[in-house]
Image (cartoon, helix red, strand yellow):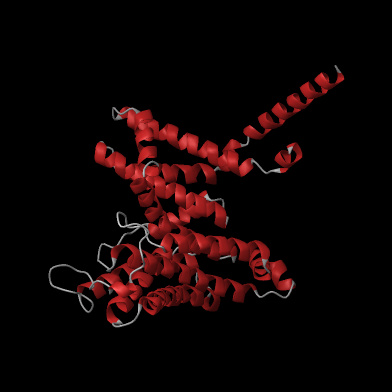
Amino acid sequence: MKEFINNINWRPFIIIFLSLLLSLLIGSIFMISSGYNPLNVYLMMFQGAFIGKINIMNSLKNATPLIFTSMAVLIAFRTGTFNIGVEGQLFMGAIAAAWAGFSLEGLPSIIHIPLSLLFAIIAGALYAMIPAILKFKFNVNEIITTIMLNSIAFLFTSYLVNYPLRESPMAPQTPKVFESARLPRLTDSSQVSVGIIIAVIFAVIFWFVFKKTTFGFRTRVVGEASSFAEFSGISPVRTAFYGMLISGAVAGLAGGVELLGVHYRFVELFPTGLGFNGILIAWLGKGTPLGALFAALFYGGIQSGAMTVDWITSIPRQLSDTLLVLMVFFIAAEGMFDWVWPLKKKFLNKKDQKAGVEKNA
């Protein structure tokens, strides 16, 4: 048991713990300066996130799209590309799912739901194909093109809900999807749907594929050493191109699940930030699928707790975003924690010396 514990790489866990601690300390400074007791606020946030059925359901609802978007970011990153356009691909997937949901009438749920999600997946993949072609055909930086395509997606979907797909003059929104296209909800008292189950299963499959299969090995080689991959007979361009398409497909799926499971229609003020938060969640999870899964569940809880704090106090719910950004900042600057490792080594050496003295005695 001792040998097993000593062989564990504790560095990521220690970095995440210290990053959380520092972000909470800095958040406490903001709260104290505003006249609030940070201990009471954090306790209230924890209760609003993880105590009580309704709060837990709200946390799962918030985490569902973040699991998908963080996986979309990781898929692209594993193949050596940076998909900053997850937000736009999510929007395109959501509007496609909405159209399939309210246009295809008379279908049973067992066909209508998968078909609507398929429309979302295809829309996200096709939208991701644009920066992929520009990068690998014309050598255009994918970071710039994906950022610009986010804005185009926002404007394009806004045009659709204001003109051709507008339900009525009263509001810029599409008609509601038919009940046959709606994802079943886990409880009647919350908006969390079976999408959370799909998201968790997808994250586990993603981990297995990239950890245990030949395809996963090929993508890791391309992402970490593209020159070596080419020497080994693996095409970095083809692998990265398909990685970008799969990433866009997952982002589109995130939009489809969010629309069919929560909102039932696309409105001009469709939730924003899901794609960009997915990037932060991927970093918070240290670039691993299971890490991102738990990070998304954790952040979904923070969002739910921050909403509770917002209801009870005058502290804005943006506190949760502030804490997330601070945590990611400290995790990205992990070199600042290098002073911990000599202390850890010194502590273990003293412990071994003490054990040796007691044994000789």
Name the foreground residue: 26 vs 145.
26
Q: Is residue 167 above or below residue 350?
A: below
Write the residue at 59% across / 38% down: 14
Is residue 151 at all visible to an observer of this figure? no
Write the residue at 27% across / 77% down: 102
Write the residue at 34% across / 35% down: 44
Write the residue at 36% across / 57% down: 273
Q: Is residue 282 left or right of residue 239?
A: left
> Residue 157's spot in the image, x, y percent?
29, 71
Q: Is residue 141 above or below residue 340?
A: below
Question: Most extreme residue toward the left, as rendered?
Answer: 169
> Residue 36's spot in the image, x, y percent?
30, 29
> Residue 199's spot in the image, x, y percent?
47, 62
Question: Most extreme residue toward the top, as rendered?
Answer: 361
Name the foreground residue: 51 vs 254.
51
> Residue 354's spot in the image, x, y percent?
77, 21
Name the foreground residue: 169 vs 44.
44
Q: Is residue 302 left or right of residue 208?
A: left
Name the foreground residue: 1 vs 256.
1
Quarter of the rendering containing residue 112:
bottom left
Quarter of the rendering containing residue 105:
bottom left
Total count of labels: 0
Quarter of the rendering containing residue 353:
top right
